[in-house]
Structure formats: structure tokens, C-alpha cells
Image (cartoon, rainbow, N blue to C red):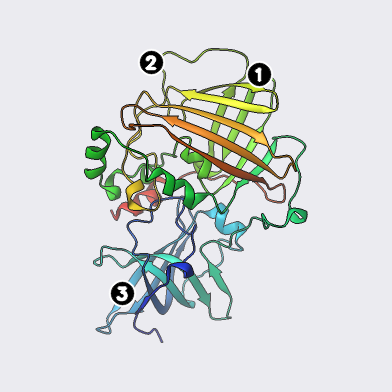
Amino acid sequence: MPIKPTLLMALACGLPTLAAAHHSATIFDRQQVVAFQGTVTRFNWANPHVYIYVETRDEAGELVEWEVETDATPILTRSGWTRESFVPGEQISVRINPDRNVARKHGLLIAATKSNGATLSARSYFLRGTDDADSLARAEDMAGIWELSVGDFEPYYAAWAEVELTPKAIAAQAAYDIRTENPSAQCIAPPTPTLLVAPYLNEIVLGDDVILMRNERFNVERTVFMDGRSHLDGSERSNQGHSIGRWEGDVLVVETTNFSFNRAPFFGRPARAEGVPSGLGKRVVERFRLSEDRTHIVIDFELEDPEYLAEPFAGTLNWYYAPHFEYLGFACDPDNARRFSGR
């Protein structure tokens, strides 16, 4: 029989750090955990978020249905899930971070335990230990499949939260409504440099005149032109911008301009990271180099956006070589994406 939901105080160290890394976690109360048992009514295996619908009884004994949100299908597939992981009618135990809007029976999955004792978590992180060099694969060059280091996501947003903003950015941030203006809910992928920390696999295809950089999220593909051309004029813009590259020894230098306006290219924790737009004058320079032991790519980036940033935003990230994974990608389902806004 279903039991009443139980509210538990959660220690920060007990929460998964990347369970909601692909979108904003600010709509969820990460300091509380709701735990309950119930019956699966639906299992929606779609992108950008997989949903489990679970019926249980509330404190008044009335049946209610919880909408339990979790990661995208590539991440869940690598964490042991399939589209048959949950079937309507089965009993499960669920732990979630609840929506801050208490009127919504909506939460972010921490873990779900099936009646056979198997537990599926929102993300079973799949990078082999960065402190064990013998377990890491080694690349010949920068071509192949690469994965963000688990330790780079939180520092990226902590550094972003300290960047000095212009008055226009501060006003835009104050007016931001994440439920209605979140680009991800419109199937719009984050542009670089945020794309660099999207917790999905990346693929690099090296060519003489063109280098392709792909990210699984929304099937993003960036084209880096290596043939010496100049940037396009300002009339041609796109979400990922126009990238030209050059080799400086073994370092790939990529300069990107011609970005279209993006309402919120940064997301994640803390809340200070939310709601700052990017303008038409945005420029990003990235420097990619293979580490000496050939286990990872070191990426130095610098973002200039004078309309919204009073100073550049710069940092360093690491992508680890991951040939043991299949690059899956995913198309965004607009109806699924709009569920984030509660419509």
C-alpha cells in the first residue's frame, strides 16, 4: 500500500551534484527530500527530461500523482536505465527534491527503488577515476569521444557567480522568470562556453579545413572553419555563433562571434547564475590542448560580452577521453520540454 510522503532534511553532501546539471536546479528545494512509495502510472522516456509518474496517497489519504523529473535518455542509458525500467502498475519507492512551488506535485529524482530491490539513481556518474591514471584511456589526438570532468561543473558556476555584471544584466536577471523564459524549455541549447560544461558526451571530428565539435544535448554541432576565412558579417547569426580556428603548435585556438541573442545562456547553481542574457557583441576564445599523458583535453576559455558583463569571464575545464561510451545524442521533444514550465 502507498504510504504518506515523508519530508526529510537532506545534508548537502548527500545530494547528487550533477542530477540537474543539464538545466536549472533552482526550481527545486535541494535542502529537502520527499520520500514516498507509490504505483507507477506512466513512464515517459523522452528528452530533454525523462519523467516517472507515481500515484500515492497524501496526508489526507487522497490519491495524488507526482511528476518525477530526471535526466535525459543518454545519461540514463549510461546509468543502467532503459525505456522499460518502469512499467505502469509496479510499486516503487521514490526519493525526490520537491518543487519550490508546493502547489505542484513535482520533484527532481534522487533515486527510485523497485520492488525487486534494484535502485536506479538520476545519474550514476560514469567517468573512470581521474586519480587513477592507469584506468584512463589515452588518445592519439583530439579526435574522438570526450566527457566533462565531474569536478569541473560546480567550480564553473561558482566562478560565473562572481563575475561583475553591467546594470543592464542586473535588471534582466531580476526580471527573469525561469519557468517561462528558460531556453531549454524551448529546445534551445546553451551556447559556448556553457556548452563546454553540458554533462553529456562530446565528439570531435578533425579535418584539414573544418573541425566538428558535437555535444549530445539537442544534437548540437559546432563547425570550426580552419581554412583561414574571416568571420561573417553581423547579419548572419546563430545560437552557437560562427567559429574560426587555427593551430598554434599543438593548441587549437577557436574564436567564436556572431551569436544570436540568448535569454539565459547560463544555468545551474547558485541562483546567482540564472537569468543573465548574452548580447550580440559576445565573443568567446577557446584554447584546446591534449594533456601530456593524453588522457584528457585541457580547455581554457574567455568570454567577453560588454553589453552584459563588466569584465571577461574566463576559466579552465577538462574533458576526459571516453572511447568506451557510445555517443547517443538526442532530439528535443517540444511537448516534453514545456513540462518544465508547468504548462
Q: Which residue is mark 3?
A: 64
Q: Nearer the viewer, residue 25 or 310?
A: 310
Q: Amino acid at mark 3?
A: Val
Of callouts 2 and 1, the N-terminal one: 1
Q: How far apart in space, not on screen, are marks 2 and 1 (Cα)?
A: 24 Å
Q: Which residue is mark 1?
A: 209
Give the residue drawn at x 73%, y 39%: 292
Quadrant housing residue 4: bottom left
Would residue 23 be visible to someone looking at this image? yes
Would residue 239 be visible to someone looking at this image? no
Q: Amino acid at mark 2?
A: Ser
- Judged left or right of residue 147, residue 173 is left
Give the residue drawn at x 30%, y 78%: 63
Quadrant housing residue 99: bottom left
| Labelled pair 2, 3 in contact (Cβ < 8 Å) | no
Of callouts 3 and 1, the N-terminal one: 3
Label 3 CA crowd tier, 10 Å (few <14, some 14–19, many 20+):
few
- Residue 111 location, x and y as percent? 49, 70
- Residue 282 location, x and y as percent? 40, 26
The label on residue 235 is 2
Give the residue drawn at x 37%, y 23%: 281
- Residue 285 location, x and y as percent? 51, 27
